[in-house]
Amino acid sequence: MSPINLAIVGVGKIVRDQHLPSIENNSDFKLIATASRHGTVDGIPAFTSIEAMLDAVPGIDAVSLCMPPQYRYEAAYKALEAGKHVFLEKPPGATLSEVADLEALAKTKHVSLFASWHSRYAPAIEAAKAFLAGTTIKSVHVIWKEDVRHWHPNQEWIWQAGGLGVFDPGINALSIVTHILPPLFLTGAVLEFPENRDSPIAADLQFKSGQGLAVHAEFDWRQTGKQSWDIVAETEAGQMVLSEGGSKLSVNGELTFTAPEAEYPSLYRRFAEIVKAGTSDVDLAPLRHVADAFMLGKRKFVEAFHD
Amino acid sequence: MSPINLAIVGVGKIVRDQHLPSIENNSDFKLIATASRHGTVDGIPAFTSIEAMLDAVPGIDAVSLCMPPQYRYEAAYKALEAGKHVFLEKPPGATLSEVADLEALAKTKHVSLFASWHSRYAPAIEAAKAFLAGTTIKSVHVIWKEDVRHWHPNQEWIWQAGGLGVFDPGINALSIVTHILPPLFLTGAVLEFPENRDSPIAADLQFKSGQGLAVHAEFDWRQTGKQSWDIVAETEAGQMVLSEGGSKLSVNGELTFTAPEAEYPSLYRRFAEIVKAGTSDVDLAPLRHVADAFMLGKRKFVEAFHD
């Protein structure tokens, strides 16, 4: 099979750091064009809009969309309408309804839509899933606490309505939780909004499963010093800790699995797989939990946040 | 086929006003038990919990769940687990995730789940849908404005987080819109919260469709005097007004369709139909738009509300 001719829309930091090296090292893909208001890639034909790119380069088979979620729908719609396969960065959209709409369009057009969740491809995720499947889980605690000033300095869009606030990193935790645990639903939530912002800076979430498993998640963007991206499960087989965003698995304090980080190479392998199989991969569960939290959650106002 | 042996859980005003007469006049159903903390139905065995009822009356085939949405999941889970068909009043749950979970459980158990939207069965809905299908829609304006003090006097639960506030009536409008218009998604929203309440008293919503149709919806619970439950569409064939909550259809000012109200009899006909066919009817689109509005919407604080 000849390589999938790929275009990238929205050439920014994540593209340079993750997408480009992953594509370069994957013989299933050949990058043939980019569209971006400012960014370009050396030696690759560059356009400033997706429309201009699709018109000028008819040989494009697939498009990776890496702009902020608020602008993703229009581009995805155009690409799918033009019969291209589409890779969506996380989160797949600003609303659940638009992604459901795109999923239906991909089906009609017989092309593949990939709503990617990079944290699901962190090194120790499958080992954690296998461990949990082999025991009885008693309770789960998710701690996702980081310093927004360090990770998102002066990024205004994350604080705007629809920017998701602390759920922007938190959805990574939810993408792992929805992959390794039984189906959950929210029973209560408190969202903390800085009094000068439209998005939450912290969230405390209580979930349970049909069988009554309790899962408590804490997201906080005000963590200085040590950063926490941990999932701790108390089980019949002891305490399991999935730490550093899914990188390391420990059981009863002993490291049982780790491997080098390779999330984006895995995402592009998965994208090639679904394109070849003629299927889509769209799991809305992580974004659905976020929407549920905004719908069900109690709002609390806290100190103003200044970058 | 012998009638479906039905039980009702949560015997309150809506059950007495709507469910009981509809069941009585439908030979597909026979009411054989109720479970409710306080309410009972004359001549029908009454229990105070769904567990006690399911244990005592093994002949129950189906259960209608009419308690507030916050308590619906537990009962639905127990009924489905016990192999009963389930009818859910609107909204089908407090979160999207729990309803998705119930839908999967119904499939596993080979029973029918009905997430009912009574406004979809208002008299003029199908006539409106047929009219719109035969023309080109230019724009749509949804006006759902009522007096909360009249319709929900001293109902504390609707003001609590998860109680949905003005979306409790607004979701009826959304259940019609998602039935008669092409798929939409939210592009912007403003939610007005009384400063002493956890749920919105008003919402202004901007939607569009993939093809670019603009839909504007206004929900307001502060309307005194004339109440408004109208959907106005500007079309190539003139102005269509679907008024009084779906009861009357007018085109260019002329009444073109009306019929007596029969929403709940239609719901029970539909429930019997899916039970006989061995299918489910779960459309989450109306609740998904509400969750999207809470996730994407800008919050604005307004005057305190006192009953």
Image (tube, coloured by chain):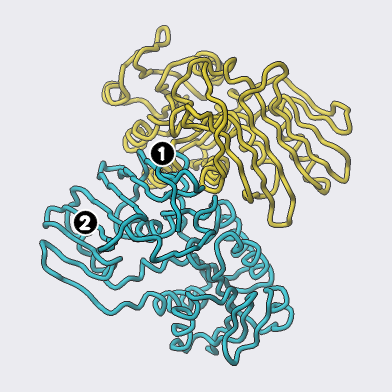
Chain colours: A cyan, B yellow
- From the top left corner, tell me how far across and down residue A302 is, in percent: 40, 42
The one of A123 and B224 positioned closer to us in this rendering? B224
- List the residue tagged with mark 2: A232
| Residue B2 seen by the camera | no
Query: Label for residue B96?
Result: none
**Is the residue marked by circle 2 packed among few (<14), some (14-19), or many (20+) residues within 10 Å?**
many
Residue at image position (34%, 53%) is A220
Estimate the spatial distance between the alpha carbons at disc 1 and disc 2, rounded to whole Å: 26 Å
Q: Using the image, determine if residue B52 lies above or below residue A279.
A: above
Say which amino acid is labelled 2: Val
> What number is the disc on residue A300?
1
User: Residue at left 67%, top 35%?
Assistant: B218
Give the vertical position of A197 relative to B127 (above or below): below
In the image, taking residue A262 as reference, residue A226 lies left or right, namely: left
The answer for which chain carries disc 1 is A
Chain at tag 2 = A
Picture coordinates of residue A252 (x, y %)? 10, 61
Camera-side residue of B224 and A208: B224
- Residue at the image point whose x is 87% and y is 46% from the top: B236
Percent position of residue B125, x then y: 71, 33
Hey, what amino acid is under mark 1?
Lys
Left or right position of B253 against A126: right
Kindly identify the residue that appears in the image at 46 percent across and 67 percent down.
A116
Q: Are marks 1 and 2 on the same chain?
A: yes
Disc 1 packing (10 Å; few <14; some 14–19; many ≥20)? some
- Residues at marks 1 and 2 touching, judged by CB atoms closer than 8 Å: no
Q: Is residue B143 above or below residue B234?
A: above
From the viewer's side, name the closer residue of A276 and A118. Answer: A118
Question: Could you tell which of marks 1 and 2 lies nearer the N-terminus?
Answer: 2
Which quadrant of the figure has residue B53? top left
